[in-house]
Image (cartoon, grey):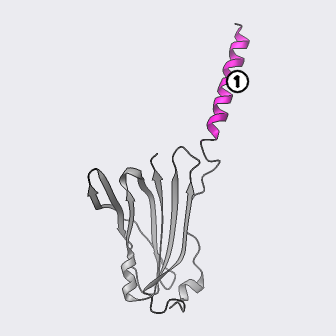
Amino acid sequence: MSTFRFHFWKSLTLSFSLLAMSGAFPPFVQAVSFQPISQDELKMASEPKAPGAPAIILFRQVDRDDRGLTAHEDVYFRIKILTEEGRKYADVEIPFWKSEGSVVGIHARTIKADGTVVDFGGKAFDKQIVKARGVKYIAKTFTLPDVQVGGIIEYFYTTDFTE
C-alpha cells in the first residue's frame, strides 16, 4: 500500500471517529450563574396567595441533559424569607442516592433586604439520611450566612448521574 493511501485512510478513519464521538458530547455547556434580583422581590413582605407563609420560592429551575456520556441536572432555587420561622431555610439539604450520582458545583448566596450580597464561602458536608444493605441516601448540607427576614437566599448545584 502506498504512503499516500495509508495516510488517506488513516485520516479518513480519524475523521469518522471524531464525527461519531461528537454526538456523545453536548454542543455547548451552558454555565449556570446567579440571575439578577428585582426590586419587587427585595421589597416583597408577604404573598397574598400564601398568607402567613414563612418563606416562598420565587424561582426554581431544573435543567436535565442526557446527551453526554453521563447525564446531569442543574438545579437553581431562589427563596424569599418572609418571617423569623422562614430563616430555617438557610439550612440547605440536597438529598441524593449515592449509587446514582453525586452533587457538585454548589454555589450559594444571601441577599439582604437592602440588596447587599453575602456569598457562601463555606463547604458542603455529607449527611447520611438512610443506610441499609448497601444503599446510601445522603444529603449535601450547608448553611447560608446572615439570613434575615426580608432577605433572599439563592443556590444552584449540579447532580452528575452515574450510568
- Residue 121's place in the image compared with 19, above or below, is below
Q: Quadrant of residue 136?
A: bottom left
Q: Quadrant of residue 141?
A: bottom left
Along the line of sight, the residue nearer the viewer: 33 or 15: 15
Residue 45, image x, y percentages? 50, 91
User: Which residue is painted at 73% across and 12% down in the image?
Assistant: 4
Instruction: State which quarter of the image contains the N terminus.
Output: top right
Residue 124 visible to the viewer: no
Most distant residue in the top direction: 1
Give the amino acid type for the residue marked by disc 1 in the picture.
Leu
- Residue 47's place in the image compared with 121, above or below, is below
Residue 64, image x, y percentages? 55, 57
Residue 162, image x, y percentages? 44, 47
Residue 3, image x, y percentages? 70, 10
User: Which residue is painted at 48% across and 92% down in the image?
Assistant: 51
Residue 26 in magenta?
Answer: no
Q: Secondary structure of the magenta portion, mostly?
A: helix
How many labels, in total? 1
- Residue 39's place in the image compared with 118, above or below, is below
Residue 62 visible to the viewer: yes
In the image: residue 162, left or right of residue 30: left
User: Which residue is painted at 46% across and 87% down in the image?
Assistant: 150
Q: Tell me if mark 1 has few (under 14), some (14-19) or many (20+) residues whose alpha carbon lies within 10 angstroms of its own.
A: few
User: Which residue is painted at 65% across and 47% down in the image?
Assistant: 27
Residue 9 in magenta?
Answer: yes
In the image: residue 99, left or right of residue 34: left
Give the SS element for disc 1: helix
Q: Which residue is mark 1?
A: 12
Q: Which residues are magenta?
A: 1-25
